Image (cartoon, coloured by chain):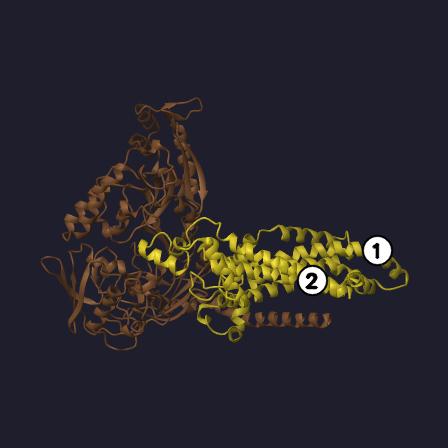
Amino acid sequence: MKTRYTFFAVVTLLALVLSACGGGAPATQVATEAPAADSGSSVLKIGWLGEPDTLNPAYAFLTEAYTVFDLIYSPLVTEDSSGNYVGALAKEWSASGDGMTWTFTLKDGLKWHNGEALTANQVAWAINAIMTDPDGWAALSGYVGGFSEVTAPDEKTVQIVTEYPIANMKYRLSFLYAVYPPDFESFTTPEDLQNFTNDKPIGTGRFKLTTFDKDTGVLILDANPEYVDGAPIISQVIYQKFDSSDAMIQALKVGDIDLLSDVPASAFETVKGFEGVTAVAFEGRSFDELIINDVSEDNDPAPTGNPALKDPAVRLALETAMNRQDIIDIVLQGLGTPGDTIVPPTLGGGFWHNPNIKTPEFSIEKASQILEDAGYVKGADGVREKDGVRLEFRLQFDVDSSNYPRIADLLADWYSQIGIKATPEGVNSDTLIAATTGVGDFDLVIWGWGADPDPDFILSIMLTDQFVIGGWSDAGYHNPEYDQLYLDQQAAVNKDERQEIIYKMQDMVYNDRPYIVLYYSNYLQAYRSDRFTNFIESPLGLDDDASLAQAKPVQ
Amino acid sequence: MARRDYLLGKFGIALLTLLFVLLLDFILFRVLPGDPIRAVIGRNVRISAEVQQSLREQFGLDKPVFPDQFVDTLGQWAQGNLGVSWSQRKPVSEILISKLWNTLLLIGLGQLLSIVLGAILGLLAGWKRKTPFDVGALTFSLIAWATPTFWLGIILLVAGSTWFGLPTGGIVSPENVGKPLHTVIPDLARHLILPTLTFTILYLGEYMLIMRSSILEVLSEDYILTARAKGMSHFQVLTKHGLKNAMLPMVTIIALNLGFTVSGAIYIETVFSYDGLGNLVQTALVKQDYPLLQGAFLLLAVSVIIANVLADFLYTYLDPRVKAN
């Protein structure tokens, strides 16, 4: 029996080795011919580290899913690369004087991927579906808040009536995709709807999905020749998932993929040096911050933060003693911009970021002086204290980031020079969430956010009522005036008026310092410029819908 | 009779171990801090607190861990139901089985190569002790054994893709995804070369070292001297008397490894973006997908236990002492 086993093993081995060689020969040929063959080919292969959680817009939460939705589905309006909203399904639109009735006229010749014509009724149906089943459409129901009625008065017109004026209407509409009603009509319960995987979505977008393999994370999209604004130049887009960023970078180097949707900062210089590759850095929408415990004393559970952190002088000292440019140069290899407010400068093409906020200049002496003036005196071990409260803080950070440990070391070092003892400690993100949001069991935390194109979401993380378990506020900021301004900006239909309110909100958060924003990190991407060209470089990314529309192979 | 008792005893221990593992499996994933719902949806998405609460109810997370969740889970396990994955919304057993074949293909191939090559090279090294071949083999196996999996994988990936045009990731090329594997064997084989090679090198060293020391010990036995004295050739002595006895420690190590290699595949599968069990465990861990993790760990534990029972069973054939007692 044992002999037979070995024999079988040897035969299998031989078979595999042979098939590997057999398959290897033509394959190697393909690999060596690849540059020549691919120079005219228009299949764009994109490498990324994630994959959509589902292709069902009712229940998709990951960015990757929305990247795909933007390619296969169309909303009424969509954001362009400079932060303005332009028509996708809609040719033109108007709002009534009170800002509560919006009328959209659809473009001519709109067709679903299966060839059927799209009607205004179907667009209205898709939005109504979300309004009537907010539990089922969990991912999108937030965008229809305040909608009272959506109708299609005629073949080409969609009308939306709201309960109150909605300031960021176009931003909200850009997530309300026209889904193909027959695909979504049959579900009777929210669970049924959410369990639908929508693996063969029918949309109206520039690309049609042909394959989505959940196991390997491979997505294949074909160009839609009948797209209303004209077919894209490239014929196919393939998304391939990698589990290791080193492997993904190597794949770009040898040409297995043509575009990297997210290059780690530490690898950017290396990728830049690859032959035939262009690496681009542009200002993105994310920032990293130092969170200061701002949880109110009457919170339940009671916050465990060092009470000295409540002192504005201590907060100012914490900011004055940090050298943002050093952090960017040392940790981000220079690929970032010093931060100030929680609204990144890229939102709305720079319209929402308050440019009047000035951060204090880095100075160890000044920071020490601030603490000195506030009555904190150095003890025998060099740590300052006042009324028995020592300036000794936990400095926690999310271990998933390779940047945070280095930032923590830099901060701890600067702080030790001004008589503050900060002890860095890496923890996983779930532990951090459990300790911060709704709880307040921390002193200082280094963490980061990615903002939406519209400032609404990033402003909401500072709301008093978001400081609950499952909410977004981790700092525990509580300011009734801020909360009211948040509601005001939502209802401010006049763009300039809304800007003014949002400027004020940024001022408040900046001066109260629940967050000290460290930097706005750059968005790093790279592509094989020896094969493809003509992408749009914008915070939306090289693989944004509009960018892929005009990308073309190098002839 | 003695053999039956021996096997029954081993089997009983295996069952007890399994029960203990079940209990540990449940507790382990619940003492971890954090909120699985938040882990599933990440930090940078918009989802209201109400929706999160309804998710919790749907997954039974709103109930206390003891006794509600525990009783629920045990009841489901007793019915052979491993539950539904939170992150993939599919039955855990279905997901595990689909990934198991891919992993078995990879580790089966890797183990086979490393066992065969390791045994042969170890035997030769032991036989030709203190020759340059032995020194070379010993050095190689020590380095191979000490090399970190992740590092070796990356080095081979870079070398293989740069010089030989081998693929940088995946189990097949994107255009072949979703097709039955037996229809794309050449493509599959190309994708298997580097991960298998990594696996082989990592385990080769261990097997070689074990085999070498084992054969050295056997060769110093009196019965080998007797065999030589009878006039048997070197080759005959080695195959008829040496090999069978030297195989005993190998069988133990192989059995132990068979169980653990599934988890060892985590690194290799991650480096090569290989769609297998190891990769699944890693993803499930990141997403705090308890049912999937529990299922995967149960499978790993069961495979270690089965491999050990198999080894005990093999002993009754290989080791006359077990046979007699």
* Mark 2 neighbour class, 10 Å CA radius: few under 14, some 14 to 19, many 20 or more: some
Choose top left, top right, bottom left or bottom right for residue A226: bottom left
What is the tally of numbered marks visible in this picture?
Answer: 2
Task: For mark 2, give the secondary structure.
Answer: helix
Q: Which residue is mark 2?
A: B311
The residue at the far right in this view is B230
* Mark 1 neighbour class, 10 Å CA radius: few under 14, some 14 to 19, many 20 or more: few
Q: Chain of mark 2?
A: B
Q: Can residue B46 be seen here?
A: no
What amino acid does circle 2 point to? Ala
Q: Position of residue A362 (x, y in %)?
A: 32, 32
Q: Is residue A332 left or right of residue B150?
A: left
Nearer to me, B8 or A272: B8
Q: Which residue is pictured at 21% across the width and 56% down the height?
A: A84
Q: Chain of mark 1?
A: B
| Rendered shade, chain A | brown
| Rendered shade, chain B | yellow
